[in-house]
Amino acid sequence: MTTATTHDGGTPARATHPVSGGPIVQLPTAFGEFVAQAWIDLATGAEHLAVSSPKAPRAGKAPLVRLHSECLTGDVFGSYRCDCGEQLAYALELIREEGGTLLYLRGQEGRGIGLANKIKAYALQEAGFDTVEANEQLGLPVDARCYKAAAQILAEMGLHEIRLLSNNPDKQNRLAAAGVKVVEMVPTEVPSREENLRYLQTKKDRMDHRLTLGDTEPAGTHAAGGTFDLEQD
């Protein structure tokens, strides 16, 4: 059974989902100075990364936490089909200023269906299906992600009460079921684009995401074919 010393110097957390943490190292980035720690989900072999602000949260405030699902197309290539890269940047900036942690959850590409299946779902979206329908057409779950390892990592880091950076209430519910108390949901809505507006509307209407969907931002170069869908926050 895995245990780890908490960041606040408390008693080591008792693991309910087996994870193992590595050394904590400095991580200078374009968003400022952070510290990073790699974690391994011993049940699946998935490797995750905790990127934390060295700044303590303001007195009386719970730390900000972002559970960010891996998105190669958005995070690395800046795809306009999703808002993932922009949410990642926004979360890192806010965490740097206010204190907290971003958990970068690998193996969760396309809400857990994997990169190749996500591209297949994109093809179906271009044929007119929304993101929910595309997954269903492929015989795949709408959301296959699991947050048990994320909840255990947070517990072992001493983050038992958090302010969750997300528009997705399902994350709050799943963390609560795993023993992590979300004291506040902090929105991460970024300006929509022509290419992702349809999907954002689907997230709001069919997945209960807390989105306002204000004015769309001019997107510059648009892919042929109009609006596209994106991965779920």
Image (cartoon, grey):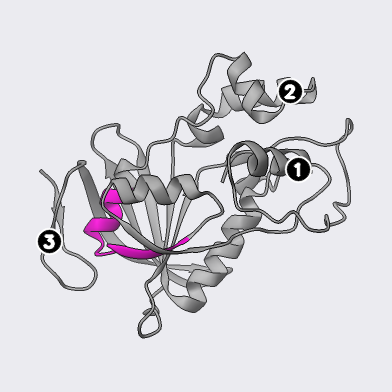
Point out the tag, 3 or 2, that comes first from the N-terminus.
Answer: 3
Residue 12 badge: 3
Q: Amino acid at mark 2?
A: Phe
Percent across and percent down for residue 219 are 85, 51
- Residue 134 lies, with reference to residue 71, above or below; the image says above
Closer to the camera: disc 3 or disc 1? 1
Seen from the viewer's position, the closer of residues 223 and 147 is 147
**Mark 3: secondary structure:** loop
Labels 1 & 2 near each other (Cβ < 8 A)? no
Seen from the viewer's position, the closer of residues 174 and 146 is 174
Q: Amino acid at mark 3?
A: Pro
Residue on which the image places disc 1: 196
Seen from the viewer's position, the closer of residues 144 and 224 is 144
The structure residue drawn at horizontal position 80% and vertical position 50%, both measured from the top left corner, is 193
Instruction: Check disc 1: other Cα within 10 Å, few if <14, some if 14-19, many if 20+.
Output: many
Point out the tag, 3 or 1, that comes first from the N-terminus.
Answer: 3
Work out which quarter of the rendered image holds the N terminus and state it.
Answer: top left
Percent across and percent down for residue 26 are 38, 69
Residue on which the image places disc 2: 129
* Image quadrant in which you'd find residue 157: bottom left
Q: Is residue 187 left or right of residue 127?
A: left
